[in-house]
Image: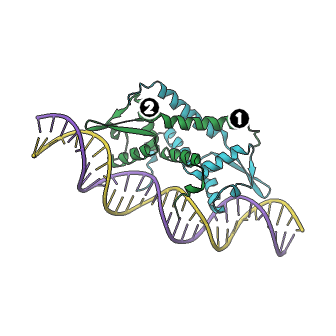
Chain colours: A cyan, B green, C purple, D yellow
Amino acid sequence: MGATKTEHFTEKQNEIAKIAKALGHPARVAIVEYLIKVDTCICGDIVNELPLAQPTVSQHLKELKNAGLIKGSIEGNSICYCIEEKTIEKLQDYFAQISINLERKNNCC
Amino acid sequence: MGATKTEHFTEKQNEIAKIAKALGHPARVAIVEYLIKVDTCICGDIVNELPLAQPTVSQHLKELKNAGLIKGSIEGNSICYCIEEKTIEKLQDYFAQISINLERKNNCC
DNA sequence: AATCATTATCGTAATATTGCAATAACACTA
DNA sequence: TAGTGTTATTGCAATATTACGATAATGATT
């Protein structure tokens, strides 16, 4: 045991969980926020922005990429990372939809 | 090592990461969706809705409660669980803000 | 070609998560 | 109070995550 039973849940549920999980670490939240703050794709400067060692940052970037939250393209001797807007949008839509459904709720608690 | 270095990040980043982490498992996404779908607080019927054993569900509920996504109140011999709307709102606001910032971005990729 | 700068991968240790059987705790009911 | 139904806790095994030193890989610079 110890492995998540993904097969029992819907594709959408697994998708949301995957994206949420990628944002389930403050370093990765910080990376995403930084990419948005600098207002452009960033080439070779993410490691210095974080209080973590280079391999650790690299691993976090990999996970964000794997979840589709960022994309990276090789640019000379460094790598340009930027936000994958579609995925952020997907999350936003999801929570917006949830909020709409919540408003219809007859608050019983 | 192995423990997250929360002390190096902002309170907001840790807060968002904590909520996102709680949603980083399809079973917990399913629980939240179910609580919203039934359109009311639900008393003693969550275990049957999930393809997991009762102790596992109980643990997931505990984590959702710990992250502030749901709240439970004792109601006779079962427990009423419902969505903590404030927390969902917090997430929604966060992603809405991010999306606004993204729109201002000069898309370079 | 040698060096430098940047990022990725490997290997490893510490810790956390996932899942469940067994059991406990609790309130209701007969 | 014995029994029933519901939820929580404990204890454990399997797996995943987090972090980083060492090292490799890659492209640019000299």
**In the rendered view, would you say C22 is above or below B64?**
below
The residue at the point 48 percent across, 26 percent down is: A103
Query: Residue A52: where, in percent of width, then height?
Result: 63, 60
- C16 relative to A52 in the view: left or right: left
| Dot 1: element | helix
Callout 1: few (<14), some (14-19), or many (20+) C-alpha neighbours within 10 Å?
few
Query: Residue A2: where, in percent of width, then height?
Result: 42, 56
Viewer-proximal residue, A69 or A7? A69
Alpha carbons under labels 1 and 2: distance apart: 30 Å
Q: Which residue is mark 2?
A: B36
Q: Which residue is mark 1?
A: B103
Chain letter behind tag 1: B
**In the rendered view, would you say A94 is above or below C23?**
above
Query: Residue A66: where, in percent of width, then height?
Result: 60, 50
Q: Are marks 1 and 2 in contact (CB under 8 Å)?
A: no
Query: Residue A72: where, in percent of width, then height?
Result: 70, 50
The amino acid at mark 1 is: Glu
| Dot 2: element | helix
- A99 relative to A38 in the view: left or right: left
Compare marks 1 and 2 and give the one earlier in the sequence: 2
Chain letter behind tag 2: B
The amino acid at mark 2 is: Ile
**In the rendered view, would you say A62 is above or below A39?**
below
The residue at the point 56 percent across, 51 percent down is: A25
Residue B73 in sight from this viewpoint: yes
